Image: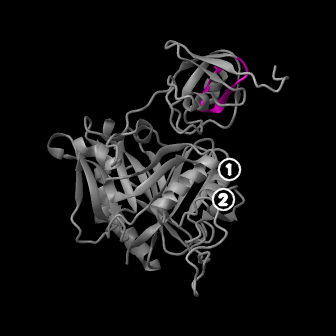
Amino acid sequence: MGVMRIGHASLRVMDIDAAVRHYERVLGMKTTHKDAAGNVYLKCWDEWDKYSLILTPSDRAGMNHVAFKVEHESDLDQFKERIEAYGIKTTMLPEGSMPSTGRMLQFTLPSSHEMRLYAQKQYVGTDVGTTNPDPWPDDIKGAGVHWLDHCLLMCELNPETGVNKVAENTKFFMEALEFKLAEQVVVGPGGAIQAATWLARTSTPHDIAFVGGPRAGLHHISFFLDSWHDVLKAGDVMAKNKVKIDVAPTRHGITRGETIYFFDPSGNRNETFSGLGYLMQPDRPVTTWTEENLGRGIFYHSGELVESFTSVYS
Amino acid sequence: MHGNGTASRYAITVARTGERFECGPDEPILKAMARLGRKGIPAGCLNGGCGVCKVRIVAGRCRATGPVSREHVSHAEAERGCTLACRAAPDSDIELEVLGRMQKGFFGT
């Protein structure tokens, strides 16, 4: 029983053609479905389920919802009970509410983001298959991302009014969804304020992260690459396609990830990153970053924050 | 105006600070500023989504180069000359007023 991994993110985009071009040509995803409402569904070559990204035409940017896949159909009923016992209302959306997808347990996080859990999504296979597979397919475009790996949600944090949606989300994820806390940033007198957290269900350092800010939003969705050189190549792909790079290749102290950040054509931030970081285990001690080392935690080389990175999100 | 094959370049002036830089006729104003390493207008996603580069055109004419987020520029504001500098290319010399600003960031930094 339990949550396995991030399953998909649904993003609002202002120019659907430009968005599809970006996620296909720059990230290297493939369109697997389009629905009557104009939503476009895409997957990465190393993913086996039908889609991991939905692009929705809108007049603004941002995230509609994030969904995680659970292991068994019956987990949805158990999570429904557990989440409602925690004090959060849920709605069970019937099978087919989203194409090729089973029923979905829908609820709103303390931070106001919409989240969903599901157990079934149509299996379509990876691009290399399961029998004597090559390590990568020949028709990869752009950066050739392997899979949607995690997302970072901005959550309202206002110590003066006592609002801390980072801490509330973290408590909910740990108690109701059985995520493990990998790393945290603590600020304020005595480090009393939990201002950012990185949480895992898989064996990697994070499947979702929460960072405190003035309002709720999407900071980024992130895709996995094999190596540091692939991150450099992703940067080359962005230059060729005139993509706005937010942060040039560097390393995070937090999670140890090797990374490049950039924006999709509607201003939703993307990351491609490489490196396992470390093996996340249930008994691994929590890593804590203190306020005065925040810059080093985020950008390990420079140790300095980047204004657009910390202030701009959709 | 562009008849001899040499594209005109327009002067962009930021009101109050007096910051001034050149911009090509098909180039978003913010992109020109960033390309030249200049300052004056807050720069975020450069793709119409984040709203930090919100400006009001005080003098001159602009063309939209793509959609702007309605979360940050309403139709009414657009009619009053507001837009995002990342989505506006000049059709003349431009004077603009900066309305957007960087919000507080991570943990209120």
Q: Amino acid at mark 1?
A: Ile
Residue B44's place in the image compared with A121, above or below, is above
Report the span colored magenta.
Answer: B80-92
Expressed as whole percent of the image width and height from the top left, the position of residue B9 reads 70, 21
Q: Is residue B103 left or right of residue B69?
A: left
Chain letter belonging to callout 1: A
> Which residue is the extreme one toward the left?
A190
**Most foreground residue, B76 or A287:** A287
**Most foreground residue, A186 or A231:** A231
Q: Amino acid at mark 2?
A: Val
**Most foreground residue, A308 or A19:** A308
What residue sits right under mark 1 in the picture? A16
Q: Few, some or many C-alpha atoms within 10 Å of disc 1 (few <14, some 14-19, many ≥20)?
A: some
Query: In which quadrant of the rendered view does residue A47 lie?
Result: bottom right
What residue sits right under mark 2 in the picture? A40
Would you say the residues marked 2 and 1 are in contact, meaning their CB atoms lie under 8 Å apart? yes
Per the image, is A314 magenta?
A: no
Expressed as whole percent of the image width and height from the top left, the position of residue A41 reads 63, 62
